[in-house]
Amino acid sequence: MEILAEGQGAYLPPDPDGFRAWVRDNKPRTLVPKMLNEHEAIEKFVSDGDYVAYDCNYFQRGPSSLIREIIRQQKKDLWVCGKFTYVALALLVEGGCATRADIGFVGFGPWLSKAVAAGRLQTYEYSNVVMTYRLQAGAQGLPFIGVRSFGGTEGFPQSGAKLVTDPFSGKPVVLLPALNPDVSIIHVHQADVYGNARVFGTGISHVDCALASKKVIVSAEEIIETDEFRRDPARTSIPHFTVDAVVHAPFGAYPGTVQGRYASDVQHVVECFGGTMRGDLQPYLEKWVYSVDSHDEMLEKRVGWKKIQALQRRETIREGYSI
Amino acid sequence: MEILAEGQGAYLPPDPDGFRAWVRDNKPRTLVPKMLNEHEAIEKFVSDGDYVAYDCNYFQRGPSSLIREIIRQQKKDLWVCGKFTYVALALLVEGGCATRADIGFVGFGPWLSKAVAAGRLQTYEYSNVVMTYRLQAGAQGLPFIGVRSFGGTEGFPQSGAKLVTDPFSGKPVVLLPALNPDVSIIHVHQADVYGNARVFGTGISHVDCALASKKVIVSAEEIIETDEFRRDPARTSIPHFTVDAVVHAPFGAYPGTVQGRYASDVQHVVECFGGTMRGDLQPYLEKWVYSVDSHDEMLEKRVGWKKIQALQRRETIREGYSI
Amino acid sequence: MTPATHFAEREHLICAVSRVIEEEKSYWVGGGGEPLYSILLAQRLYASGVQYMTEDGVIAPQSMMPWDPLMTMVASRAGYRALQWGTMNTAGNFAQLGYVDVGILNTLQVDRYGNINSTVLGEYEGGQGRRFGGPGGADTIAAQCWRTILMTDQQKRKFPERVDFVSSPGFLDGPGAREANGLPPGTGPWRVFTPWAMFGYEEQSCELMLMAISPFVTVDMVLAEMSFEPKIAPTIETLDPPMEEELEIIRTQLDTDGQTTGRGQWVEKRDGKYVFAETQGRE
Amino acid sequence: MTPATHFAEREHLICAVSRVIEEEKSYWVGGGGEPLYSILLAQRLYASGVQYMTEDGVIAPQSMMPWDPLMTMVASRAGYRALQWGTMNTAGNFAQLGYVDVGILNTLQVDRYGNINSTVLGEYEGGQGRRFGGPGGADTIAAQCWRTILMTDQQKRKFPERVDFVSSPGFLDGPGAREANGLPPGTGPWRVFTPWAMFGYEEQSCELMLMAISPFVTVDMVLAEMSFEPKIAPTIETLDPPMEEELEIIRTQLDTDGQTTGRGQWVEKRDGKYVFAETQGRE
């Protein structure tokens, strides 16, 4: 199994044995209550230097309130899993939190060019599916997984991938290093206090994120009884023992949408996106992050009940988003 | 990526490119009606010499009526994916249909020893999860997948697995060849006429079986409208374009159970299992397969309405088995 | 159908792509913008049963109209009444298995061999180039769908001899290069559409080949907006203009405020000929 | 609890295993038989919150009692009110990730290094051995759970020096062999229970070590029913007999017709001592 080519990008080295040892020593197996508020959860489970994954993004069922809390707490030197993301990376970079990113897709604009040119952000190049495959391998406890794409691109040399000879067919195939983030943050429709969680509708890689990560913070629109999970076990997306903290965060994906619950706030999205395109996100961060103490305060002081109602009113589809 | 050891067992060689070409040329993408009766489905889509997978088994939401039809049509030289199976392999061997099996778990007893000793059955050794991992790789279009088990066993030399040096960590890891069966047969709770299908409750590898196989026959307890799938798309287990034939088979898992629908027939199970333990399944095959023309005739003449009702009556749990 | 007399060149682009969409093929499209508008238009006029999937694992939806620019992926209206919901790997796996015939993509740059850049304009090394968002799903689409359709603008800087960065693979360096890098055989670029032209690829050389032009430009105008000379098909066809019925759908259901299609130049029929319009924008 | 005075040795086996089950650990057990009865008994008496999974991806069920011998995996009563339902790979992945502390397994043979045979008695090659069903889920359980508990009978043929076929890995050939074959470090055999004895492993040599015997046998009786001489712990404990409360649960909820536990020898208390009984079977 000859190595034909290999990327030279830095990557979080796959360490399935180390991950297993972490799970053995840190993850309770029984039903342990894990409710924390957003401040406690981020303070306790996101450390400077962590590799951070989140599922979906700032506008689409993402853990937006937790992303803002990371910025509010000024976490440093984070390495971000940039699959299917958009402005979240921009906010984390401009907030001084993120210095590295594995790129599937990230929001572009002057902020990105400036951050890269100034050396404030180091990027490594992948693609969205290549990143979700890496997470799948991490979620299966494997050191690597093959993929039939990515070979021949100019992202490949900037990555941790290798082109090898398939020992079964003799043909070339790309191997990707498994990814086990230090922490993942995932916004869900429903969770219980122990961390059992349900996501309705499509997602990017939420289940794999939870299984692959050493630390997992779930924020949930609703907290429900554990017995509710037992009534329809096929609907459990994430089982409790993988989760470290549960944050009750109604409108936690704001300004994004949560399918079947509320629409995204168009005006806010334009404001945020505009900041990335102007390359100046500080006013946005000041208004929506630094000048409020918490997600709840932001909802109350910056959004208001009337808009909250309007966003709920605009989301009129229910099919598939409840049991 | 050195090869440290490799099994010497014959195996269906992984051929992701060949599988892709098959899909390109044989799988309609649009909603094409695919209803066939069991005779037509097996006649058309199971060929002598095929590698056959089925999900679950003769006693547990398996495609039991289709297995009997394979025997009735005296298909020859089948190579059976023996994951999590039990008497089904015994029936296929004693019916003269199966001559090879990849073994995860199969029903034992004198029939097995005799068939192996007489050279009527060639076995290759794996384990249940090793086989479902092989199917997963096949269902992802990959040539192989790693696994952290199987190494060091005496099944390994009788398999298609290889022990290689992980090019990322330098540690040894087992690689399994992907498995793309020629045909898989899967019994489901609900399907539409195009092949969209739902399985409720747990399963072994039903989704991966459908995605990994060149030809897919689904038998269903109920045929439902396509719009029913659209009302809860997360519940679709198998999408239509992977399926070649849909057979309406109420009680298709008989004598086994279908969760939420009917219990297994204890008396029948004992009769069948007894045949495997005595090493004489011909009376069983005569009574339940050869002497009836079809599954419907078997239900009518050998089972009867009273027992059908009783088996439905005995299955009293509904939670999780409907929408 | 009635040929239109006043339309945006980007509307024309969407109409042109919609007409090559085939009912019996399966598609992977981005979550918004021109690629999606093209297939939605085709569904409504030319291929009602055609099925598409998106990157978040939405399989064959019946998206709720009118389309909203913020109604991107992982949104209820975009995934409405799909046949299946999964995740990104659901989409990736189906493509890797060969179940997806055609991918439709926007691109920043495309070169002679159909390579796609969505990462950087200028030098990647050193960090001084102008950075973009990366391949997203395009790498998988370009590698694994049997064919890809690219959509871009007809501008010199969009058609360099070699893209500044190969984010997603075209034919890479030419015949055989995809397979040598582990990509599935029999796949690759198929068409490039701009508002002004339709390109294919010459089979043997894998090089971009001009096949058709829009009725409001000439071959020379097209070639002037490319940094390299493409192969030229023996016969250059002229693309049909948009039809009123197509525009009606684009304007009332797909891009109701013209956010995507309103940009660029407008075209009108004057003295029996299609020419660039004096009036820009919808009436 | 009240020590029982008349019980099957297999009932004793189940009780002994149930007492080593720890609430804060997670388990993977087979879908029926002694391993499952042991954890169900523990749930009812010693570790009410303990969670187990089965091979078909049932995570932490509240199985409906009484247990039915045909109520194996993929059956509604066995998976009732679980916290999650998945597939075999769900179970396999959790184990591979290190989430499963203990696997409990039946075995046909176990050897000095804890290797497990469920494939063949006699020679594999040539096909003349007596064939069994293969490892099933045991290979994964034995490779990936942090510890494994084996359950078998105390018979010479069940304890050969080397199993006829290593279906699932114990310590293979001794220290380091698991890691050299790609298995996760820090895992391996932990206990072997028979109706007569409990074994562990000597840490340095990885060899089977007798740790405790049942109150109705002697060390010599145990050793006489092994084909090799195991290590012997410095102190040999005596296992407690079953308690009436345990037997009540086994007989009314778990193995109501004695199909599994009724086989083998029965034990009774006579003159203050536990001895093999004259009366076999439940009263």
Image: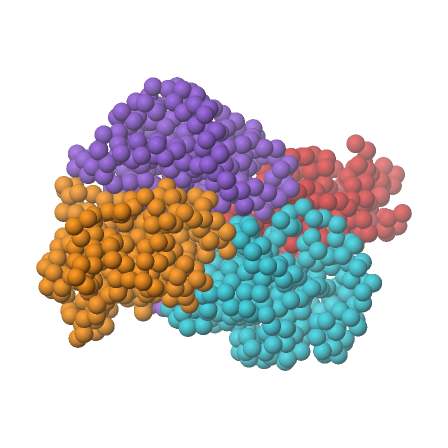
Chain colours: A cyan, B purple, C red, D orange
Q: How far across and how far down the image is residue D44, in percent?
A: 41, 59
Q: Residue furthest front?
A: D271
Left or right: where does residue A129 sit relative to residue C241?
A: left
Residue A163 visible to the viewer: no
User: Horizontally, is A243 left or right of C199 in the view?
Assistant: left
C34 or B6, nearer to the observer = B6
Picture residue at 46% right of the left edge, 44% below the top: D76
- Quarter holding residue C128: bottom right
Q: Is residue A313 left or right of residue B48?
A: right
Residue lying at 46% horizontally and 69% vertically, measured from the top left: A27
Instruction: Tell me which residue sits at (55%, 79%) in the image.
Output: A48
Of residues A308 and D38, the one nearer the viewer is: D38
Splitting the image into 4 quarters, where does residue D229 fall? bottom left
Whether residue C42 is situated above or below residue A140 in the rendered picture = above
- Report whether residue B193 is seen: yes
Quadrant into which the C terminus of chain B falls: top right
Residue A46 position in % (x across, y down): 56, 75
**Between A150 and A34, which is closer to the camera in this rendering?**
A34
Q: Residue at x 10, y 64 (%)?
A: D220
Front residue (pair A94, A266): A266
How far across and how far down the image is residue D226, in percent? 13, 58
